Image: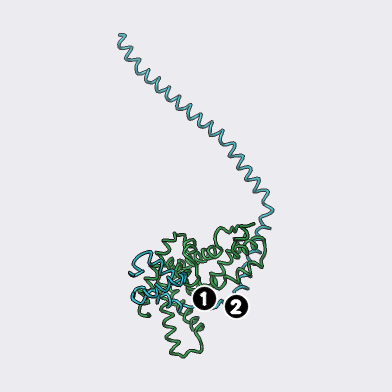
Chain colours: A green, B cyan
Amino acid sequence: MEAAVALERDAQLMLRVRAGDDTSFAMLLERHRGPVVHFLYRMVPNQAVSEELAQEVFLRVYRSRATYEPTAKFTTWLFRIATHVALNSIRDRKKEKGHESLDEELLDGMERQVADRQQTVEQEMVHEVKRREVRQAIEALPAKQRAAVLMHKYEGLDYSQIAAVLRCSESAIKSLLFRAYESLRGRLAHMA
Amino acid sequence: MICLSRNEQGAELLASYLARTLDTAARAELDGHFETCTDCRGLVSVWERLDEFKAPEVTPGFDARLYARIAAGEARVSAWRRWLWPPVAPVAAAVALAALVLFIRPPDAAKQSSLTSNNAEIELVAQAVDDLDLLIPLADTRDR
């Protein structure tokens, strides 16, 4: 009973999903939909693909409900699935030819939509260039480093969680992150 | 203070600073260091630059699409269950038969093994007899 009380809220919700409560699944979806889609968008990065992958992640969560055990934090488990799905997608996309130009077009259109309409054209162009440079710098990182940076910087996962997601030791993750930030510093030095 | 990025402990401290998990005093100490260290300042600057990489909002139909896929998946599973249910008895019978065959096999194998062993013994005896036959002419010669 005490163990059940000590369980984090997400794990409690997932246990209710396991017991057949679909409302709890809706609550989990509400809480984690944004972070998972955003993480996948920065991994891929293409909105349509990232949402498709996020659907795959939540489908896997739902289909695994019967065997779910709260052995780790729910977000660790969730991001492990998301990272697995993202890395598979990146690997598959590398095999395809000619997708880069298509993605660039899609991404550019999307980023234009996101841009603040109130900005002047000039300001928008400056921001657009900065966004593109940051995105390209992150995209240039090896996939594992990219995943670690995205979880650390944007999703607020701590070292132990990132280590669990990527199946590394905490010290390996610290070293991995540091190399990634060093690499980003080299690529984005002109923006400082 | 030497550049934090030059050793593992310093790098860890720097990463904690970036993740805003340091207390005020430790944070202030690092702020002082950044005023004189361009490398560390560069890393902090990179961290801030990463804020430029915004992700778009999730499209409105996301949940509906997901629930439709879940429902379709559940329907498929139910259909498979309905389809698989009647042949369960024949499959169980086949498994039982296979298990029976496995039980019967070991005595055969033992018998086979025994036969192989017997054959080897016969061969040894035959070889010994052949050797004895070879000795007989020699004995005959000596008798003469």
Q: Are marks 2 and 1 in contact (CB under 8 Å)?
A: no
Vertical placement of residue A99 versus A167, above or below: below
What SS does tag 2 mark? loop
Q: Residue furthest front?
A: B25
Residue type at mark 2 is: Pro
Residue count near mark 1 (Cα–Cα under 10 Å), binned few <14, some 14–19, many ≥20: many
| Residue at which label 1 appears | A47
Vertical placement of residue A96 versus A169, above or below: below
Q: Residue at x 44, y 84 (%)?
A: A127
Residue A11, by quadrant, is bottom right
Place of residue B56 in the rendered image (x, y in percent of width and height, measured from the top left): 52, 78
Q: Residue at x 51, y 88 (%)?
A: A117
Chain ID, mark 1: A
Place of residue B62 in the rendered image (x, y in percent of width and height, measured from the top left): 59, 74
Considering depth in this image, is A160 or A90 the residue closer to the camera?
A160
Q: Is residue B76 visible?
A: no
| Residue at which label 2 appears | B60
Residue count near mark 2 (Cα–Cα under 10 Å), binned few <14, some 14–19, many ≥20: few
Residue type at mark 1 is: Gln
Residue B32, labelled with which disc? none
